[in-house]
């Protein structure tokens, strides 16, 4: 197998061994074996730069933001608002008014459902999603359907896990009020044709929300080039902390939207008779935010841009190709999700072995993969399977990780015959 390893240690090329040294957790063992972490689509590990940025903030600068005149409050506010500017640059948004800090992708999509869509839709109006969405981009629209009587339309996928374009276009109707789709599928790895989706929707005057949870760690995202109206992602899949994420929204839309949670920080004045709301972006940030999370997220953005998102993507793509080739050779193994354009996710089933058993055997070999429905139960239903095992690659994975995965899968095959 050594001959098939991509040459990633060439001088001047992506130096994965150096990258690995930035992630202390990768040095640990699991069950006496060196850890192989292949569950990046669920949550990525954090580099020292992120751990240190959070520690530095907590050690030297913490206080509540936007409220005090004292030095620490000013330092915390500077750190928090500085992080917002870092996110603006990362996404190439026009203004920091367009960057709302939230808990993660899930909260961002719920915010759009409740604050953008709910006041605008009624019976007969349609929200258009696709058949490969994560539950976070399904359930908020079902809740909206219960609240407003609107209809949820689902554009189908083919057996490779690709959006069927003609069907999608056909479902874009005069009653479509919003298109909400994944940029990259977490269960299948499919990269959706988001530019084309935005173009087709906008041609009919329909705004588009992109769920970028799986895209931001692998693809340089430019919201102005994409032209999308909303973009949602989570920090923890981008090598940043949990509990912090971002909703990007075009200022014109955000300005018209009512706040979605009420409380401190999102107001200018409050009396029992009348409250005036704060300006963007704070109108959408009720209560004390996850300040150190924002600081850590900004550090994560510095980190990935330091490595270069294109370099990360090329590295991961080589691993995806290697894994696809090697896994396809294993007796009874079927890869689920074979789209032409894919991010570094390999979902698979094995004849006569339940995905949970695959996960358990791999864990005993020190290899961490995810097994289950990946919060995309309709995708599993479409393929007629209860679950898959899923290996997902990040910036620190190596060809040797693929080799360990393959060896552990052979072991599973031996155990189950
Ligand atoms: N959308 C997609 C495509 C995802 O992969 C995930 C996380 N698995 C989410 C949404 C939800 O992200 P979070 O749990 O961080 O809110």
Image (spheres, rainbow, N blue to C red):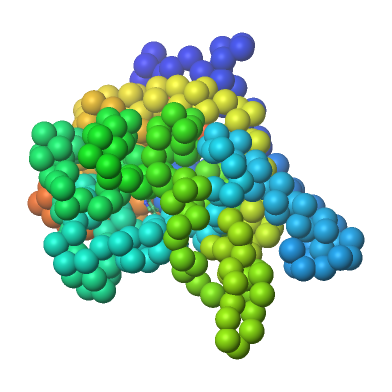
Give 379 or 16, whichever is nearer the viewer: 379
- In the image: residue 298, left or right of residue 148: right
Question: Is any part of residue 280 visible from this angle?
Answer: yes
Placement of 228 over or under 109, stated as above or below = above
- Outermost residue on the bottom side: it is 272
Q: Is residue 55 in view?
A: no
Q: Residue extending furthest top?
A: 11
Residue occupying the far front of the picture: 273
Q: Is residue 284 left or right of residue 138?
A: right
Location of residue 281 with respect to 224 vertically, above or below: below
Mark count: 0
Q: Residue at x 36, y 47 (%)?
A: 209
Residue 61 picture quarter: bottom right
Estimate the x, y position of residue 10 in percent, counting from the top left.
56, 12
Q: Residue at x 19, y 35 (%)?
A: 162
Seen in the picture, residue 343 relative to 40 is either above or below; the reply is: above
Return the x and y of residue 341 as percentages of the image width and height: 28, 27
| Residue in the foreground of this view, choosing between 97 and 300 | 97
Q: Determine whether 397 is above or below 377 in the image.
A: above
The residue positioned 75% from the left and 51% from the top of the image is 79
Question: Which x, y percent locates residue 401?
Answer: 45, 34
- State the image coordinates of residue 330 (x, y, percent, origin top left): 22, 33
**Left-right relation of 159 to 6:** left
């Amino acid at each position: 197998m050594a001959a098939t390893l991509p040459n990633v240690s060439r001088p001047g090329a992506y130096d994965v061994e150096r990258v690995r040294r930035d992630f202390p957790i990768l040095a640990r063992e699991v069950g006496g074996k060196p850890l192989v972490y292949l569950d990046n689509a669920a949550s990525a590990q954090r580099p020292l730069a992120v751990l240190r940025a959070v520690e530095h903030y907590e050690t030297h600068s913490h206080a509540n933001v936007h409220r005090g005149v004292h030095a620490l409050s000013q330092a915390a506010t500077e750190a928090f608002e500085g992080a917002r500017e870092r996110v603006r640059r990362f996404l190439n948004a026009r203004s920091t008014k367009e960057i709302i800090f939230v808990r993660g992708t899930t909260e961002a999509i719920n915010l759009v459902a409740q604050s953008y869509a709910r006041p605008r839709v009624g019976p007969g109006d349609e929200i258009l999603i696709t058949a490969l969405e994560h539950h976070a981009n399904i359930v908020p629209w079902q809740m909206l359907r219960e609240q407003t009587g609107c209809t949820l339309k689902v554009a189908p996928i083919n057996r490779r896990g690709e959006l069927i374009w003609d069907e999608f276009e056909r479902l874009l109707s005069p009653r479509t009020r919003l298109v909400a789709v994944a940029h990259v599928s977490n269960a299948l790895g499919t990269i959706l044709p988001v530019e084309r989706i935005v173009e087709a929707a906008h041609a009919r005057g329909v705004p588009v929300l992109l769920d970028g949870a799986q895209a931001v760690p692998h693809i340089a995202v430019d919201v102005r080039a994409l032209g999308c109206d909303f973009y949602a992602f989570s920090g923890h899949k981008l090598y940043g902390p949990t509990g912090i994420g971002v909703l990007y929204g075009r200022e014109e839309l955000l300005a018209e939207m009512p706040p979605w949670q009420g409380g401190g920080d999102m107001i200018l004045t409050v009396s029992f008779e009348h409250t005036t709301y704060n300006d963007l972006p704070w109108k959408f940030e009720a209560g004390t935010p996850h300040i150190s999370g924002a600081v850590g997220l900004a550090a994560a953005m510095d980190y990935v841009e330091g490595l270069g998102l294109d370099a990360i993507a090329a590295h991961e793509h080589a691993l995806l190709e290697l894994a696809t080739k090697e896994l396809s050779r294993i007796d009874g193994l079927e890869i689920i999700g074979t789209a032409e354009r894919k991010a570094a996710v390999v979902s698979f089933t094995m004849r006569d072995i339940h995905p949970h058993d695959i996960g358990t055997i791999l864990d005993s070999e020190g290899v961490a993969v995810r097994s289950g429905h990946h919060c995309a139960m309709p995708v599993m239903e479409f393929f007629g399977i209860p679950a898959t095992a899923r290996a997902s690659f990040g910036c620190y994975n190596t060809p040797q990780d693929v080799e360990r995965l393959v060896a552990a899968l052979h072991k599973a095959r031996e155990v189950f015959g």
